[in-house]
Amino acid sequence: MKNLLWLCEIRGEKPATVAPLYGKQGWQIFPCIGKQPAIASGFKSASADPDRIAEWWTRWPAANIGWSLPADWFALDVDPRHDGDKSLAELYAANREHIPFTLEARTGSGGQHLIFRVPAGVEIRQGANFKPGLDTRLGGRGYLLIAPSVHPDTKAAYEWTSLVEPQDPPAWLVDLVRVPKAPPRVAYVPTTSTAEMDKRTRYARAVLKGVCDDVRAAGKGQRNDLLNKAWFRVGQYRDAIDKAEARDALMSAALDCGLSEREAAMVLR
């Protein structure tokens, strides 16, 4: 897809005549009725195979041509019906850097398709409505209607208005449509030193021993309440003492004070 002068051959032709020319150049295309794919899986089944293209346009001779862009190209879709032309003019004025002369088409609604190379190391957002009337289309994730397709509403034909190779987009456009890079993951570093953690564990075990002693000394009418409070108190040190260890110690204390295993288990649960 280096030399695009062959696009001159499609002017004034019918889609059924032009479709094989696109396929011959390796462009992945498929038939559309209006703007909708005529085949079940749409652009995902786009092909440059001449036999498949012939079969499609024999079946739908008046079908528009849908184009699945190459993976390293993307399109800026400028829709004036939603103020896309105004949005683009505002971006020109704000950034003082115009879009380079690149592969371009006029759409059937009077808008523009501007085709660019995807810069190395950059991921472009699909369908990014970053400004009113401005969207993106990506290779493998979306498609465009291309000449000589006819817009279903205006009945105007799509037309290539420049035949140059896609160029790199300006930096300001890349910044607007790129997928932000995820911040680097920072390894978790405990805020508590080993010595401090050891000290906290020793203290937690002392707390556990203390509440177990309180439970063992509890009389009737106090045992369930004290066991509940003891479990809550020990839970404040769950980062420093094993839960199973704490539960076993409290269960033992509860049995020593006369609670049944079933009743103690219900309180601890």
Image (spheres, rainbow, N blue to C red):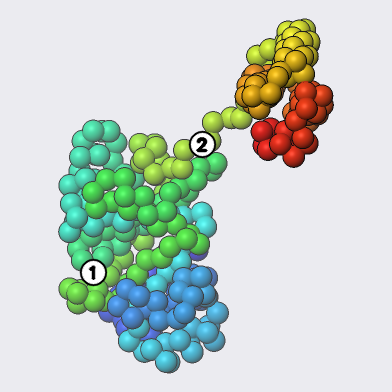
Instruction: For mark 2, give the secondary structure.
Output: loop
In screen coordinates, is 219 left or right of 128? Answer: right
Quarter holding residue 267: top right
Which amino acid does the dot numbered 1 rest on? Gly
N-terminal-most mark, 1 or 2: 1
Kindly identify which numbered label has been placed on residue 108. 1
Which residue position is annotated with label 2? 181
Graded by Cα atoms within 10 Å as few (under 14), some (14 to 19) or many (20 or more), the crowding at tag 1 reads many
Q: For the view shown, which residue lies furthest in the front direction?
A: 220
Residue 238 seen by the camera: yes
Quarter holding residue 7: bottom left
Could you tell me residue 236's position as x and y percent?
64, 19
Quarter holding residue 137: bottom left
Which amino acid does the dot numbered 2 rest on? Lys
Q: Residue at x 45, y 47 (%)?
A: 124
Q: Is residue 89 above or below residue 31?
A: above
Name the mark nearer the viewer: 1 or 2: 2
Cα distance in 3D space between marks 1 and 2: 36 Å
Q: Residue at x 19, y 55 (%)?
A: 82
